[in-house]
Amino acid sequence: GIQVEQSPPDLILQEGANSTLRCNFSDSVNNLQWFHQNPWGQLINLFYIPSGTKQNGRLSATTVATERYSLLYISSSQTTDSGVYFCAVDGGSQGNLIFGKGTKLSVKP
Amino acid sequence: DVKVTQSSRYLVKRTGEKVFLECVQDMDHENMFWYRQDPGLGLRLIYFSYDVKMKEKGDIPEGYSVSREKKERFSLILESASTNQTSMYLCASSRREYTEAFFGQGTRLTVV
């Protein structure tokens, strides 16, 4: 089945710094989503981005489907950005998602 | 706003009990999913359903069953809870394949 790899696994930033998280996937996909898991465990939707570029405030994402990777950019990071960021791609025709292991982000004040 | 609601945020059950985890979505989505999340293993699919009364096994269905009697509700059943089923359980829904999925708040289940 499709493999999803995220890097880096851990990232520590000072407040105000910028960061780039990467997601590589091993096969063509029809769905790619980025999530932020909050401290209570809920997965918050950030982007639905099977291709192209999207922006939402300080966050933006780009997926280059032909090269099988996606990037999540966080600018001017804040302590509330801390948590685990997951990339997920479609795992089959019924819409289930295959998740990467996540990037754990810690933003220090 | 889209909403997926899980019946409990925290649950403690005894070994051997029958456990029901409930999930309700208000978006008229066809697809619903149950995942579990464990440290070091990530999120893994237990079961999913693409229509009322339809169900498909995911990657780790052993020890679980599901029920979908109404479109908006998808239940995960632990027939006889065991300590190795202590985990975070996450429910999700989506309209059809290749569309955006939305998750509930999660249920942290502890089996003692």
Image: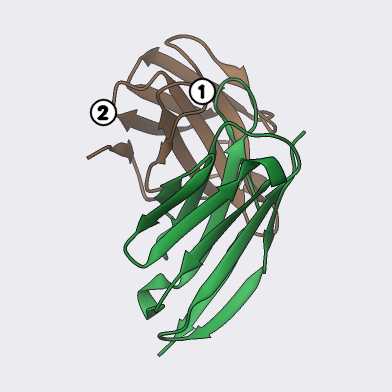
- Seen from the viewer's position, the closer of residues B59 and B76 is B59
Q: Image point 37% across, 32% down: which residue?
A: B23
Going from N to C along the chain, the mark reached first, 2 or 1, is 2
Amino acid type indicated by mark 1: Glu
The quarter of the picture where residue B35 lies is top right
* Quadrant in the picture for the N terminus of chain A: top right
Q: Which chain is painted in brown?
A: B
According to the picture, the residue beneath numbered tag 2 turns out to be B26
* Quadrant in the picture for the C terminus of chain A: bottom left
- Seen from the viewer's position, the closer of residues B87 and A20 is A20
Label 2: chain letter: B
Spatial separation of the CA atoms under disc 2 and disc 1: 18 Å
- Seen from the viewer's position, the closer of residues A69 and B81 is A69
Amino acid type indicated by mark 2: Asp
Residue B13 can be seen, yes or no: no
Q: Is residue B16 above or below residue A22?
A: above
| Residue A20 left/right relative to B7 | right
According to the picture, the residue beneath numbered tag 1 turns out to be B97
For label 1, the crowd category at 10 Å Cα-Cα, with few meaning under 14, some 14 to 19 and many 20 or more, is: many
Dot 1 lies on which element? loop
Single out the residue that lies furthest toward the left. B1
Dot 2 lies on which element? loop
Label 1: chain letter: B
- Residue A3, how many percent across, how many down? 75, 43
Q: Is residue B84 above or below residue B77?
A: below
Name the image colouring.
by chain
Marks 2, 1 in one chain: yes
- Residue A7, how many percent across, how many down? 68, 64
For label 2, the crowd category at 10 Å Cα-Cα, with few meaning under 14, some 14 to 19 and many 20 or more, is: some
**Chain A drawn in what color?**
green
